[in-house]
Amino acid sequence: MRWGSFALCVVLAGSLCAAQRMHDMSGMHIAAAALQVQNDDSGHVLTVRLGPVNVPAHAEHMAMAQPAPAFFEITFDGWITAYHPTLTDAAGNKLPGQLLHHVAFYNTARPDFVCANKDEHIFGAGGELRDWPATPGFGYRVERGDRIRITSMFHNPTDTAYPDTYLQVKIEYQPAGSGQLHSVYPAWLDVKECGRSDYDLQPGRNVTSGTNRIDFNGVLIGVGGHMHDYGRELVLANETTHQRVAKLDATVDAQGHLVSMPIVLFADRGGYHLNKGDELKTTAVYDNTSGHPLPDGAMGIVVGYFLPDDPGQMTALHKHQ
Ligand SMILES: [Cu+2]
């Protein structure tokens, strides 16, 4: 194993590694957190570890200092095949996933193929710490030097303070030259279309829809979903062909907290075919039983892997920085 380990301190207001706190434009507290990257060359696992993050007891996400965006560089040509997120303390002991509000990875070298105004969003998880297992034969193509941005937010609904919380994501990959994979691209089909994903929930039932156009011919290999607490279901429909693509029923506990979202695979039919120009409508249904409005409390996103008919069109989107 080669330890290509380095600690990248987030440059914040001109100061490196200062345990400082400040407000950014949106009023969010920002804290400096370090990112460590370790590449297991022979096992083909890149591990990124962000922290420590001080997570006080009973902390709403707006009330605690959040890690600033952090960056790392891809050190190989190949395909990312799987992501395994965990939360740990400094000693490596597992911590409850509910401390994580969300984490997102973006490839700054590529625009999102659905929303060109955004960087390609290649991985995300919330408090359920959903694993992104490998789909045999498929991967997300990366090039050496691609710069990945990590945004994350923590919170703490529990009675226990966790002063040294680390977010660790193990990224499995297959180097180029050791067999060819089909290159798939993440499709984020958001009820807020290409805008900010968060939206407000009113008490009771909330139904929100948005439409995204697909500009490439290809197939969806499968879809999962992202919702927050009080989520009930996500429905993806092809408005152009008047077909329902998938319905994803959320599993919630007795208090309405989100436990999991299902994954629907279209492998048995060779993928769900989409034509260039198809309009895909995503509808999110929430039942907010908290009794009060929840500002920015919701997201409704169907997340799929898209396999283009013509891989060259998608490769051409890569920005050679
Ligand atoms: Cu979210």
Image (cartoon, grey):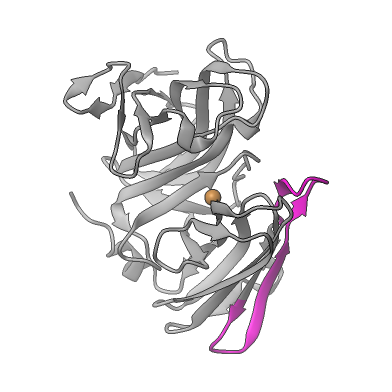
- For this rendering, which residue is in front, 193 or 79? 193
Q: Nearer the viewer, residue 34 or 26?
A: 26
Residue 35 visible in image: yes
Whole-percent x, y for residue 142 in the image: 36, 48
Q: Residue furthest front?
A: 292
Q: Nearer the viewer, residue 222 or 213?
A: 213
* Residue 75 visible in the displayed image: no
- Residue in the picture at 45% in, 25% down: 49
Looking at the figure, which quarter contains the N terminus?
A: top left
Q: Is residue 228 left or right of residue 103?
A: right
Residue at screen point 55% across, 77% down? 281
Residue 65 point in image, percent of width and height: 42, 28
Q: Residue at (23%, 27%) from the top-left corner?
A: 11
- Which residue ends up furthest to the bottom in the rendered image? 241
Span colored in magenta: 237-262
Q: Look at the picture and state if 265 lies above or below 167.
A: below
Which residue, as the protein is rendered here, is positioned at the far top? 91
Q: Nearer the viewer, residue 261 or 62?
A: 62
- Residue 127 inside the magenta-drawn segment: no
Residue 162: image location, x then y, percent: 57, 18
Q: How many marks?
A: 0
Q: Would residue 58 appear left or right of 71 to someone viewing this image?
A: right
